[in-house]
Amino acid sequence: MLKLLMIGAGGIGGYYAARLLDAGHEVVLTARGSHLSALRENGLMVHYEGRDLFHRPEAFDHQQIISRFHPDDFDVIAIALKATATASVVAELGDWLRRGQTPVLSLQNGVDNEPLLEEAIGADRVIGGLAVRIGGHIVRPGVIEAEGVAQIVMGEWPAASQGESPHKQLLGTLASAFNDSGIPATLSDNIRYELWRKLVINNGVNPLSALTGLDTRTLTQHPEFGKIVYGMMAETVKASKADNVKLLQKDLDEMFELISSFNAIKTSMLVDKEKGRPLELDSIAGAVLRRCRSLGIEAPYTSTVTALLAFEAEKPG
């Protein structure tokens, strides 16, 4: 059985934690504010496509994690926070993480989380990862709604090494544990490629959904918005070249088909906007725009939608 620390018990982290707890694994959660209080007082309730998953896991804030645990108390440390929080996690927990050798698995949006972690604790401690085809959010403190196949893709960072490596056995163990817990998990020899494929979808629908208030199905099926989604995804494919990732036309078309056929969900960026929380705009659209600038190419769809969102955020009220 695994002992896992899940940094971030929101829609994604809370769902995966509940699945692992259901299978008998030990999972310690981090949270803050009213969500942390509710987890301690009432437990974790996850509503998932007609099923209710309820548990009473240990839950702490970051300072309590530092004082109560050593990093090597865990088999793996997973981060499921918003990408906007990665830098603050490194600032708060970096010294604590460096006390041990336990690998850190990122399950976040964007392509800049693993590089930040690598800088803080070294590439040999980082496992790249992403959550695929999952929608999830906190509906009220202690209660989460999730939907979708909810896959996990993982791999050595920045790419699989030749021969044996410290993470190969652990990755196999994690994949088996996740699959046995009802979490479809696969291993990738090129995790950076997989992260960019997900960014193609995220940049295609997240900013535009936050701007329009529309769900993913409505966006992709709309005669005009669908073109914008495809255009933003195409700009992401071009931006990937800056990281020496070779996404092709078939990747673009596969990702557009995937999001077009997925459940009609509110994107995480739309949910954040409705709740008045910071948007992952810089982690998603910003990552694309920075790389397009470095390549000397234009990204008119992404830059226009980003500018409109920024303008809207600056309006009084």
Image (cartoon, grey):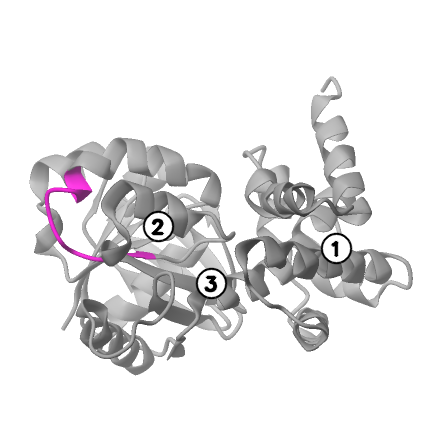
Which amino acid type is marked by label 2?
Answer: Ala
Cα–Cα span, label 1 and label 3: 19 Å
The residue that disc 2 covers is 9
* Magenta residues, start to end: 96-105
Quarter where residue 260 is shown: bottom right
Classified by dominant secondary structure, the portion drawn in magenta counts as loop
Q: Is residue 219 visible?
A: no
Name the spot of residue 292 as percent of width and height, x first.
68, 47
Mark toward the start of the polypeptide (2 vs 1): 2
Mark number, residue 55: none
The front one of 64 and 227 is 227
Determine the residue positioned at 48% across, 59% down. 145
* Image vertical order of residue 107 relative to residue 301, above or below: below
Which amino acid type is marked by label 1?
Answer: Met
Mark number, residue 232: 1
Name the spot of residue 82 as percent of width and height, x first.
46, 45
The residue that disc 3 covers is 192
